[in-house]
Image (tube, rainbow, N blue to C red):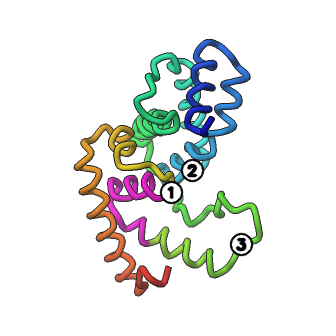
Amino acid sequence: MNSSELEFALLNKASQGDEGAFRDLYDRTHKKVFFYLYRFLGDPNKAEDVLMETFTEVWRNGHKFRGASQVTTWMIAIARNLALNELKKWKPHEDIDNFPDLCSDSRPNPEHSDRQRVLRDALSRLSGKHREVLDLVFYHDLDYGEVAEALHIPLNTVKTRVFYAKEALKEALKKLGVSPDDL
């Protein structure tokens, strides 16, 4: 059983009230959803709050999932909608650069940290729509169809956004004096 099939099976069990299956599903998926939310909201506390809301919705509405996409794609769509609601309530005051790299479990590599800083700076210069589509495609490894489903937009719109987002990222890197090949 591959990862997607296992997550689907866990969601089915959880939707029937199996708390152990829900806990297993959470353990398998929460980091991916959290990092999406963290990059989307730019605040680890808000990301954690929306993560909890997301999994509450997953628990309540797991029976509505029909398997048209991967479970994590469905969860990210839920998380995105909740995050958009959260953004309407507040304006972030912290810059993402003020927080340590949450993904790193080991000693930081200065060269890697520099690359991440430059990439974050370049990404911060893109529109929200462009940042979001690049995040879903490159950080979350969603295919274009899954991105279209998560964002509730047509597939061709995803393709167009990715194209223009890559061009905008190249331009932002150029303005920072960095060649994309340097990363």
Evaluate if marks 3 and 1 touch, with contact meaning CB atoms under 8 Å apart. Answer: no
Marked residue nearer the N-terminal end (1 or 2) = 2
State the residue in front, 156 or 85. 156
Magenta region: 122-139
* In the displayed structure image, the side of residue 155 where residue 97 appears, left or right: right
Camera-nearest label, 1 or 2? 1
Q: For numbered disc 1, what is the local secondary structure?
A: helix
Q: Nearer the viewer, mark 3 or mark 1?
A: 1
Residue 70 in the image, given as x and y percentages of width and height: 48, 36
Is residue 131 shown left or right of residue 49? left
Q: Earlier in the sequence, mark 3 or mark 1?
A: 3
Name the disc covering residue 35, or none: 2
- Residue 123 among those drawn in magenta: yes
Write down the residue under mark 3. 108
Q: Is residue 105 visible?
A: yes
Q: Residue at the spot x=27%, y=45% of the render?
A: 155
Image location (x, y in percent) of residue 77 = 43, 36
Q: Report the residue at 64% width, 63% height from top.
A: 101
Q: Please say whether residue 134 is one of the residues in the magenta stretch.
A: yes
Q: Would you place residue 115 above or below residue 2 in this image?
A: below
Q: Residues within 10 Å of mark 1 (few under 14, many from 20)?
A: few
Q: Is residue 27 left or right of residue 37?
A: right
User: Alpha-carbon distance for marks 3 and 1?
Assistant: 19 Å
Q: Are marks 1 and 2 in contact (CB under 8 Å)?
A: yes
Amino acid, disc 3 = Pro
Dot 3, how many residues are within 10 Å of its Cα: few (below 14), some (14-19), or many (20+)?
Answer: few
Image height of 163 relative to 12, above or below: below
Provide the secondary structure element on which disc 3 rests: loop
- The image position of residue 140, as x and y in percent, is 50, 51
- Residue where numbered disc 1 is placed: 139
What amino acid is at disc 2? Answer: Phe
Q: Give the amino acid at mark 1.
A: Tyr
